Image (cartoon, rainbow, N blue to C red):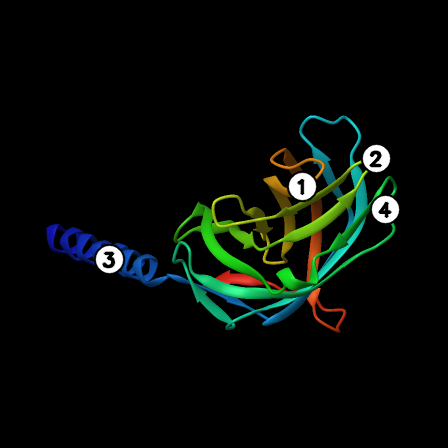
Amino acid sequence: MRRCTLLLAVACAIVCLGTLVSTATARNFSTTSQTWRATYRSLEIRRIAEVEAVRCPLTIEGSFHSRTFAKSVGALIGYITRAVVGTCEFGSATILPLTLPWHIQYASFSGILGARITSIRANMVNFGMNVREAFTTCLFRSTATEPVAWTLSFPFGIVSGNLEGEIANTAGECFFETTRVTGASTSIGVLNAATRITITLI
């Protein structure tokens, strides 16, 4: 009886050790597609001092450098190579072409490593727009210290993304004022296809 108990304890220890090793080596994320497109019905752009916001549809397209990328803070994992703003509800906004490509840098993850990862946060650097309100024109461009956060959520594998950031304006009538950018979650699909991408931890 004592021998059986000892064998059972050893077996449990081996299983636990195997789990720990698996958890320790699970350090990369894998995506089903390197190229992707995300469309936001309403990107909200509002100066902190203003009540009215400029709301515009936004489509961004880009790619990851590889189908897999490591959990390395600050690592450049991809680019946004194309961004298109549609007709705004109030005011207008245009992309600054010379700021492209926007850089995507890995920042952090949420969830339990080895159990379930629910989201990845990446930072968009060089995100640049010229925004025209009723009587004011503002120009802003995100930096490594003031990035636009891109949170990729995938509680069940399928990826959706939120945009959010506070950036100081660099030119125009609102020089040095802070502009807040938010984009409601949208599903992210494979570029030029109807398939949605998924992300897993490996």
Q: Which residue is mark 1?
A: 181
- Labelled pair 1, 3 in contact (Cβ < 8 Å): no
Q: Which sits in the foreground, 171 or 41?
A: 171
Side of 149 where 7 appears, left or right: left
Q: Which residue is mark 4?
A: 88
Give the alpha-carbon distance from disc 1 to disc 4, as whole Å. 14 Å
For image coordinates 85% across by 41% down, the residue present is 91
Question: Which quadrant holds residue 25?
Answer: bottom left
Q: Which residue is mark 2?
A: 135
Q: Residues within 10 Å of mark 1 (few under 14, many from 20)?
A: many
SS of the residue under disc 2: loop
Give the quadrant of the C terminus. Answer: bottom left
SS of the residue under disc 3: helix
At label 4, the amino acid type is: Cys
Q: Residue furthest left?
A: 2
Mark closer to the chain start, 2 or 3: 3
Q: Which residue is mark 3?
A: 17
SS of the residue under disc 4: loop
Q: Nearer the viewer, mark 3 or mark 4?
A: 4
- Labelled pair 2, 1 in contact (Cβ < 8 Å): no
Give the alpha-carbon distance from disc 3 to disc 4, as whole Å. 56 Å
At label 3, the amino acid type is: Leu
